[in-house]
Image (tube, grey):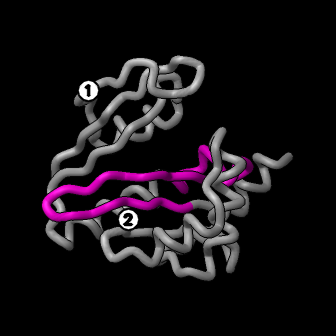
């Protein structure tokens, strides 16, 4: 029934905007549910205020449902984190955020984006590869439990 309702009344796409300090509590809550070690509100406040960090939020109504942060020093940027609330995953929000984010970075003179992802995170790897990222290296045993981190790169 839910699929029929979504087919007949497709959900509106999220509104994408720059993150602001007032978003920090919601971003910390989303991050805590998405990762084994969530970042605190104070960490998000600090990052959003930092002049080399670019942060974007996806909102449904006024509520943030996803975000992305990068550290940017032209001509390169590194994605620090990307997260979408659990019940909104696999609906294109991460893709929309990443596309918007990369477009904004490119407009600032960024020509290369890097990121790290756990090798077993197939959903994230699928997204990143579909958006043009390719493996540029590996960090053996980087994550707790011994999983490798894949270092990905995208030139644009």
Q: Which of marks 2 and 1 is nearer the N terminus?
A: 2
Point out the stretch of residues depicted in magenta: 67-94
Q: Mark 1 highlights which residue?
A: 137
For image coordinates 43% across by 32% down, the residue present is 125
Q: Mark 2 highlights which residue?
A: 100
Q: In this view, does 28 lie to the left or right of 72?
A: right
The image shows residue 36, relative to residue 9, as above or below, that is: above
- Which residue appears farthest toward the right when viewing the image? 1
Most foreground residue, 35 or 57: 35
Q: Does the magenta stretch include residue 69?
A: yes
Helix, strand or loop status at disc 2? helix
For label 2, the crowd category at 10 Å Cα-Cα, with few meaning under 14, some 14 to 19 and many 20 or more, is: some
Helix, strand or loop status at disc 1? strand
Q: Is residue 62 left or right of residue 148?
A: right
- Asked whether disc 2 touches disc 1, contact meaning CB atoms under 8 Å apart, the reply is no
- The image position of residue 96, as x and y in percent, is 46, 59
């Amino acid at each position: 029934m839910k699929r029929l309702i979504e087919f007949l009344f497709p959900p509106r796409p999220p509104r994408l905007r720059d993150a602001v300090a007032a978003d920090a509590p919601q971003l910390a809550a989303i991050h805590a549910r998405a990762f084994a070690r969530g970042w605190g509100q104070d960490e998000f406040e600090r990052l959003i205020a930092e002049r080399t960090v670019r942060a974007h939020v996806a909102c449904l109504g006024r509520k943030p449902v996803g975000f992305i942060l990068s550290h940017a020093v032209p001509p390169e940027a590194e994605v620090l984190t990307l997260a979408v609330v659990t019940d909104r995953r696999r609906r294109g929000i991460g893709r929309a955020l990443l596309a918007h984010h990369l477009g904004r970075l490119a407009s600032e003179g960024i020509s290369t984006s890097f990121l790290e992802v756990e090798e077993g995170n197939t959903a994230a790897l699928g997204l990143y590869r579909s958006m043009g990222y390719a493996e540029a290296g590996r960090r053996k045993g980087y994550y707790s439990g011994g999983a490798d981190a894949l270092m990905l790169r995208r030139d644009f």
